[in-house]
Amino acid sequence: MAMEESNGNCCCFCVGQRVLSLASNSSERGTVKYVGAVQGYEGVWVGVEWDSGQGRHNGRVNGIQYFCTQDQLPSGSLVRPNKLSAGVSLLDALSSRYKATLSQSEEDDMYVTTQRRMRVAVELVGKNQVAEHQAHLEMLTVATLAYTGVCSAGAQGEIRLSAPNITDLDLTGNLIPEWQEVGRICEELPALKLLDLSSSRIAITMRDGLPVLSNLTTLVLNHCAMRWKHVEVLNGCLPKIEELSLCGNKLQKTTTTSQPFVGGFESLRLLNLEDNLFDNWNEIVKLSQLQSLQQLYLSGNCLQQLWYPDSSSSTADHHHKDTEFKPFAALRCLLLAGNKISEWSSVDALDQFPALEEVRLSQNPLTDSGNGVAPRYMLIAHLGKITSLNGSQVKPRERRDAEIRYVRHVLSTMQRKDMEEIMKSHPRFEHLQVLHDVPMDLGGGSTGKTSTMASSLISVSIVCVAATIGERAPITKKLPSSTTIGRLKVVCEALFKLRAARQQLFFKDQDAPLPVALVDDMESLADLGFVANTTIIVDEVHD
């Protein structure tokens, strides 16, 4: 795509303008910080702060400060005007992207090489039909113009006349300089619902008032160096916004005013704050009064703990006394993968969210598959209302088996502790024990009665999949609940002639996505909460 260039001695750039480098093998984008002379050199120079941060200096050259970069980082350069482009209009980019046809030389370059080193031309099936459809911009509804140098909406009315039906527009990595230009684009595209402005640097100021984007329902501002003060400014400009994405903006706080809660955003259903720097749950609690919020994405942050702010908390005292305080009233999906959560109290707090159905907790210290602290069945038992965990559906049978297994695990590991202490660490234990009618005494054979012995036996189906043994039919054994994993390996050695030291055992739950490795030889079947008809898989350790 051809982009306008400036003469080396005559500069049309201005401070604050977004530019694209025309250097070979470069797609660098930046913001003009200085235009003028440089001591010791002839002609006009343009000082640019590059988005990538890969510059030569902080604006200071030979002892003279021509401009300042953010945080005085070496992200600036002085460039000749003819090495920069100011970009193109939206219509020019659309025409270049969707009306352009391949030249004969480009088509000749499209081939594959056979085993006999012969070139076979590649024929794009349906190419002509697709090209014909795309050439009619008035029929276009979804447009992708990432990194195409778009800097403006163009002349008034030209986009509205040429492509009035666009509903989804991707402008990732372009050169739009300020929010007023975003307003012009939305005004020119009355059907626009989704706008992606990721990897942009758009100035958001109130000097002339910001345009209201009444048609947008989805806005993506990932990796835009946003601060929450910018989000607050945009709040009143997005009356119908339903989905807002702010990933990768290094956000740490959610309010900058004296108000204790984030207000407005009355239609907001989904807020994506992944890959930021939130480390304090208090900042997330400030979002709890967004009454339409159903999905909150917080994966990839630095949160260490969380709690549910009930109506008696100090946070609620700041709310209007005549309004019922119900935090996160509509929240049904909360993604917390890749944080630093390490305490069970945070998991138990999730069970207090009134509408929560879907949770992600993978890649946290508590759920790290390497340490086995929080296996899937224990998470399911702690979270009584969820129907999806870590992207996998929790079916009724899996929930029932997980809860029974959990109760048995608690009973076997906390026999010497009183009920009050158990309830403190396991708030759902009493309810689950009664619900599933699990006897408080798991039996240890101390009475010597046959019925007690029978009740302590667990039916286990053992399946060997070791490559050196070959396919074997499953073998069912009734084992005491006190049987350890180490002892179970001895049983498997007798059954399959595979040395215990060479065995790797797994527990297979019918509704669980993957088998769970049994790594602690000292744990018993009761410790693990196994119930009747448990399936154990025997595999071979590979060198």
Image (cartoon, rainbow, N blue to C red):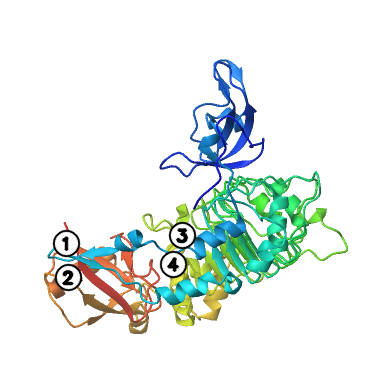
Q: Residue 427, image x and y in percent? A: 58, 65
- Amino acid carrying label 4: it is Arg
The reply to whether dot 3 and dot 4 touch (C-beta < 8 Å) is no
Q: In which quarter of the image is residue 90?
A: bottom right
Give 275 or 288, whichever is nearer the viewer: 275
Q: Which of marks 2 and 4 is nearer the N terminus?
A: 4
Residue sitting at the far right? 322
- The CA span between labels 2 and 1 is 10 Å
Q: Which of 329 and 210 is in front in this view?
A: 210
From the viewer's perspective, is 370 left or right of 152? left
- Percent coordinates x, y for residue 536 in the rendering: 28, 74
The amino acid on which the numbered mark 3 sits, given as a three-letter code, is Ser
Rendered view: 526 above or below 344? below
Question: Which callout, 2 or 3, points to the residue nearer the camera?
Answer: 3
Spatial CA span between label 2 and label 3: 29 Å
Mark 2 lies on residue? 466
